[in-house]
């Protein structure tokens, strides 16, 4: 998604010495609400949901609340804990192309939105998405994602290959209907080409 978010944020800190203060990781002392980056909801594509896609926003929330966990995994590097992730489905099982799916990420450290987006792009490149498509998909997140603080949650509900929605600390962000976005985002973790296959195995419940 890394979300990563995304996975490659951890790879960027691989050369940190264990006896020195971490370099390149912001650990701000001011965690007041005034220091948080605002969520900009206005520039994401947010067309009105059609009857053929989702019957109502009530059904979205209902499915969100009744999801069952498929698997969970921690993203750690050396002595750093980056995030915990959970994958959920309607029946607690993972099957490819069965929807809805929900990925929930809880961050264990502060990460700027710019770093999350950069890591997401790196992962899209890793799993083989065309650069022209990446530029199009990137537009869907770069205006919406906030900086995250330790304890924040970023969730993504995938309703089908082309329809999904982010939630930041349970606050709904605009629906994303960009073709291919939903599948591309979850493929960061679920694709067989993921850079973290052990994380994938845990998330899809293969290690149960």
Image (spheres, rainbow, N blue to C red):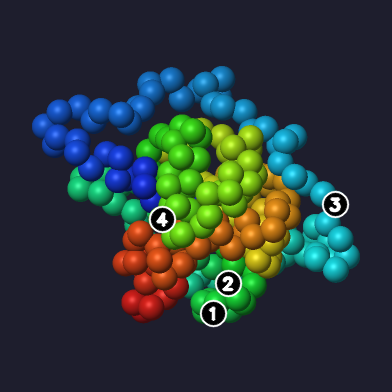
The circle drawn on residue 89 is 2
- Percent across and percent down for residue 186 are 53, 61
Which element is circle 1 on? Answer: loop
Q: Would residue 86 be visible to someone looking at this image? A: no
Classed neighbour count for the residue bearing mark 4: other residues with Cα under 10 Å, few (<14), some (14–19), many (≥20) = few
The residue pinned by badge 4 equals 126
Q: Is residue 137 above or below residue 30?
A: below
The residue pinned by badge 1 equals 95
Q: Is residue 175 left or right of residue 85?
A: right
Q: Nearer the viewer, mark 2 or mark 4?
A: 4
Tell me the distance, in whole angstroms, between the alpha carbons under discs 2 and 4: 26 Å
- Mark 3 and mark 4 lie on one chain; the one further toward the N terminus is 3
Q: Would residue 62 be visible to someone looking at this image? A: yes
The circle drawn on residue 48 is 3
Q: Nearer the viewer, mark 2 or mark 3?
A: 3
Q: Which residue is at 54% across, 79% downward?
A: 95
- Percent across and percent down for residue 13 are 27, 39
Classed neighbour count for the residue bearing mark 2: other residues with Cα under 10 Å, few (<14), some (14–19), many (≥20) = many
Q: Is residue 197 above or below residue 108?
A: below
């Amino acid at each position: 998604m890394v979300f990563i978010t995304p996975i490659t944020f951890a790879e960027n800190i691989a050369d940190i010495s264990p006896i020195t203060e971490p370099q390149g990781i912001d650990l701000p002392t001011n965690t007041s609400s005034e220091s948080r980056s605002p969520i900009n909801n206005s520039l994401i594509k947010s067309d009105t949901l059609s009857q053929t896609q989702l019957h109502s926003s009530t059904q979205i929330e209902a499915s969100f609340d009744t999801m069952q966990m498929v698997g969970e995994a921690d993203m750690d590097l050396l002595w750093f804990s980056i995030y915990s992730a959970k994958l959920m489905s309607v029946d607690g099982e993972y099957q490819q192309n069965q929807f809805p799916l929900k990925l929930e990420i809880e961050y264990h450290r502060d990460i700027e939105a710019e770093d999350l987006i950069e890591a997401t792009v790196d992962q899209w490149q890793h799993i083989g998405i065309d650069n022209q498509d990446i530029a199009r998909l990137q537009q869907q997140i770069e205006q919406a994602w906030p900086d995250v603080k330790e304890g924040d949650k970023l969730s993504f509900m995938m309703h089908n290959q082309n329809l999904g929605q982010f939630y930041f600390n349970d606050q709904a962000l605009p629906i994303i209907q960009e073709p291919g976005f939903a599948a591309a985002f979850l493929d960061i973790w679920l694709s067989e080409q993921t850079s973290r296959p052990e994380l994938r195995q845990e998330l899809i419940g293969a290690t149960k």
